[in-house]
Amino acid sequence: MFKHFIRLQWKAFFRSASFATNIWFKILMALGALYFILVFLSLGIGAFFIIEDAGLGDPLRVVNRYMIYYLVFDLYLRYMLQKMPVMNIKPLLYLPFKKAQVVQYSLGKTVLSFFNIMHAFFFIPFSVVLLYKGYDPVSVVGWHLAMFALFYSNNFLNITMNNQDRIFYPIIIILAFLGISQYYGWFDITLYTAPIFDLFFDIPLTALLAWGLLVAITWYSFRYFKQHMFLDGGLASKTAEGKTEDYVWLNRFGNLGTFLKNDIKLIRRNKRSKTTVLMSVLFLFYGLLFFSGGLEVYESPVWQIFAGIFVSGGFLFSFGQFVPSWDSAYYPLMMSQNIQYREYLSSKWYLIVIATALSTLVSVFYLYFGWKAYLAVVVGAIYNIGVNSYLVLWGGAYIKTPIDLTSNKKAFGDSQSFNAKTLLLTIPKLMLPLLVYWLGDFLWDQTTGFILVALAGVIGYAFKNKVFSLIEKIYKKEKYKTLLAYKQKA
């Protein structure tokens, strides 16, 4: 039966309308996986010696101290990026397959997920180094197996936490606050969690507790998944009480106001769009890595512009890159109406500009790190409005990815978001402002670099009508390809 399921997915992959795109995406994924494998492998081999040379104490105890953050960050990435083990379940419910077999296959697939395998490239070499350094072999094996069980527990815990935002996000916020508290010396949660991980080494038999937890979570995931495999149950579309939101104050803007009202309602009512807004809020704090001086590698002035672009452009990158995919559910209906592409694109542009301006105002707290830090955010906002806002709309014409607004999966992207044209458009988004700033700073000074980047944004805004005409032509050219792509559910 499992061979039959594998054969079905194999055929679905090769018969998909986006087969060529999927091939390139798989290649990019393989390259990305190779990069992370090398990173984890390097850390697995070198972590012991780096910690030892730094004089931080017993390397194993140091790793155990911060293991709680490693586990939580792994769970966060899984929740945001890992696909749920659902493989076109609705058609299978009409066929003579046992639900238990479908669930076993779906959950079994997650065992081989890269989210699980990549940790082995850290823990296996790290454990080998521990053995080489003379640590007790039984204790090392017990600790290693316990870590193995805990990360696989994350795998199955992620399945049961799917669609449980009210549980997941408060936990993440609390743990983020605990991390900040530890950084500034207010409260150290690792004093209470490190002994638990140390116990797996000191008393190897306690690894059975971690494996007991894994068995319990796996069994619960199986039961949970199986109980929700009904068309009128877990697979049914969720409904909620309808609420009227008129936003009459936007009527003065005509058709542009109508599009803006639709976008505001879309953001407020749907899970995927709410997740995107949350992501854009998190971008506001991205600059702390660059402006706080916590990491020496980011102290170069060029990186300040990089930070300014992301701090002010969180909504632009997370929401703007999926225009017009946000409207994929009713895009064919829109295209059958007497709608001008210029008005449609303008509404998205104004929404991006408003969000960029608000992000810049909220980011005023970066003045704490000096006026140049906040100036980098302001300059980044000007460049985002004058240049990057056009580029994300332009790139959207080539991203033919239908979006499921009821799910927050793939919130960071999708396979069809990657193609040669969208990757080429990434260069002026990120690299061009860095190059312009570096040129000004190299020839004159840092202030000149800021001025040149801001000037590029102002010039871009001055050519707004001309640029919009070009983008409109591209959308018209790609119209029917986009409509065809939105019919594909795979």
Image (cartoon, rainbow, N blue to C red):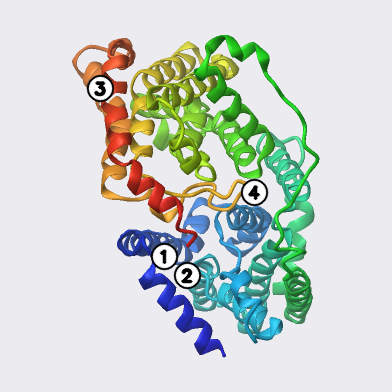
Looking at the image, tell me whether mark 3 or mark 2 is earlier in sequence order.
2
Residue at point 62%, 33% (across, down): 267
Q: Is residue 67 left or right of residue 112?
A: right
Depth check, mark 4 against mark 3: the one in front is 4
Q: Nearer the viewer, mark 4 or mark 2?
A: 4
Do callouts 1 and 2 mark residues in contact (Cβ within 8 Å)?
A: yes
Front label number (1 vs 3): 3
Label of residue 121 in the image:
2
Residue count near mark 2 (Cα–Cα under 10 Å), binned few <14, some 14–19, many ≥20: many
Closest to the observer: 161 or 32?
161
Q: CA distance from mark 4 to mark 3?
A: 41 Å
* Whether residue 95 can be seen here: yes
Q: Which residue in the structure is indicated by mark 1?
A: 37
Q: Is residue 437 visible?
A: no
CB of mark 4 within 8 Å of CB of mark 1?
Answer: no
Where is residue 390? Give x, y as percent: 35, 26
Counting residues from the N terminus, which is met first, the one under dot 4 or under dot 2?
Answer: 2
Residue for badge 3: 436
N-terminal of the pair, mark 1 or mark 3, is 1
- Residue 448 image-quadrant placement: top left
On-image quarter of the N terminus: bottom right
Q: Amino acid at mark 2?
A: Phe
